[in-house]
Amino acid sequence: MRFEKINDVLGTANRGNPAESGLCTLCRADCTGKCETWKSSLEGRKLLYPRDFGLVTAGANNNTHVGVSYNSLRIQGYAYGSMGLAEQMTNDPDDCIFPNVDLTTEFGNTIKTKCRLPLMTGALGSTFIAAKYWDSFAIGCALTGIPIVIGENVVGVDKESTLGGGRITSAPELDRRIDTYLRYYENYGAIIVQMNVEDTRNGVAEYVAGKYGNKCIIELKWGQGAKNIGGEIQVTSLDYAIFLKERGYVVDPNPALPEVQEAFAKGAIKSFARHSRLGGTNFSTVEMVREDFMKSVEYLRSLGFDRISLKTGSYGMEELAMAIKFASDAGLDLLTIDGSGGGTGMSPWNMMQSWGVPSINLHSKAYEYAALLAARGKKVVDLSFAGGFALEDSIFKGLALGAPFTKLICMGRGIMIPGFLGANIEGVLHPDRKERVNGNWSSLPKSIADLGNSPEQIFASYFDVQAKVGKKEMANIPYGAIAMWTMADKLGCGIQQLLAGARKFKLDQLSRNDIFAANRETARETGITHITEANNESALRILAS
């Protein structure tokens, strides 16, 4: 394991056990700190360096030589050369500095969607935590210029939404989410609306097409890395559970049964789980899946959607190949491939622990399959990798592992933490806003109070955000969005530094040669060269010269 609960060098600590990403396995919205992502949301790029500079020396303690994971990949560095500098620059040392690394990226088949950073959110759907902190997530993503995904079931679980003839006629919560992002959108990033079985039945695509048109990307969903069944939430109201069942969802236990209602009244049952349905259950062959997929894409295009994406989960190799081949043949704009195991909502714990293909294995095969198509002269769909990414080094590794096909890294829990943190701070500093922003604290923890008692003092990037939106508009920016900007600034700076070390000054210059495997097993599973074999032939030629 690379991550320990306490990192003395950065002054960070995990409340729970660290996952492969460095986040706690259980991330709480009311957490008082202080993992690296949490602190990055306050201090920004300062978290790239050891604390107490001038009083300390520091050395790496990570053991990345055991097992197969992203932590068993290491980043290559070079002692000479430069690639990808902007046209007006030269390879002079004054130009070859890390702030000059261009992190912009784009994805899309015929219409290109530009992003300021190679990041996007995971699907933030019907989970209540997504709804509570949406303003922070959406405004933060719009300001930083990255895509955000509205996940499945948002319309179906909205008690204020209305259906006519079985189709959605009004969707206040979906409207709120889209409009919040678009208010600050500046032609970088995108708002992506995801659909599952229930969303398709309810006419979500038709509603979005009619009201927003090509302001949104529409996303088909095959699955996710957190679980191998449909999306889930948990509700504590009997009336709400009955509403969801009447909306056509699977609700467990069945709230319509008299014995279940009695058990709830007596307190024996305290909550209900709402489940979505499995897709593709009426198909028995790959050909049937392909035919239905192509018809679905054709129908979405007939509604007017110029940009369509697909999200798939950590199924086996057959489904991975289907996703890449079908998405490429259909001319889709993006394919997000989510490895096991993580998520932003409610997933059965032991299922999340045990099912599916871990991220590094899945992503390695995704590259292999994409390269096979490319070698046959096929245009390969742009890829986004998801599943356990939080820090700048893992983002670099994911982009390199899938290069040149991978354009984005999709972050779930890691990109939500600043939203929680900012809301908690805002609720303390402005008690009149606490309920509205869903703050969880009654006072600032010492780790934050030590930074100051105002947002200008607490957030390292406060004045960067103010410079972008103006002093007057700052009153409308939630602190969670400021925290997200601050964390994104740290991640962006860290990626720039790693790319500069690899002598790549534009993101699209990144290649699989910029990482190597720390052990033979990882080299075998990923196809990435082992440390001592990388450039070894060149080294031998130097010695023989």
Image (cartoon, rainbow, N blue to C red):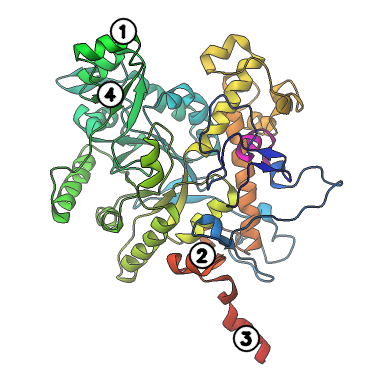
Looking at the image, do the residues carrying marks 3 and 4 touch, with CB atoms under 8 Å apart?
Answer: no
Q: Main secondary structure of the magenta part?
A: helix
Magenta residues, start to end = 36-45
**Residue type, numbered disc 4:** Gly
Q: Residues within 10 Å of mark 4 (few under 14, many from 20)?
A: many
C-alpha gap between disc 2 and disc 3: 23 Å
Is 94 in front, or is 384? Answer: 384
C-alpha gap between disc 1 and disc 3: 77 Å
Q: Residue at x 41, y 26 (%)?
A: 177
Q: Is residue 86 left or right of residue 145?
A: right
Task: Identify the secondary structure beneath mark 2.
Answer: loop
Q: Which residue is mark 2?
A: 511
Task: Identify the secondary structure beneath mark 3.
Answer: helix
Task: Identify the secondary structure beneath mark 1.
Answer: helix
Q: Residue at x 14, y 54 (%)?
A: 285
Q: Which residue is mark 3?
A: 540
Above or below 184: residue 520: below
Among numbered discs 1 and 3, the one appearing first in the sequence: 1
Q: Which residue is mark 1?
A: 265
**Residue type, numbered disc 1:** Ala
Among numbered discs 2 and 1, the one appearing first in the sequence: 1
Q: Position of residue 527 (x, y in %)?
A: 45, 68
Q: Which mark is residue 156?
A: 4
One can see residue 478 in this view: no
Q: Residue at x 30, y 58 (%)?
A: 317
Among numbered discs 2 and 3, the one appearing first in the sequence: 2
**Residue type, numbered disc 2:** Ser
C-alpha gap between disc 3 and disc 4: 63 Å
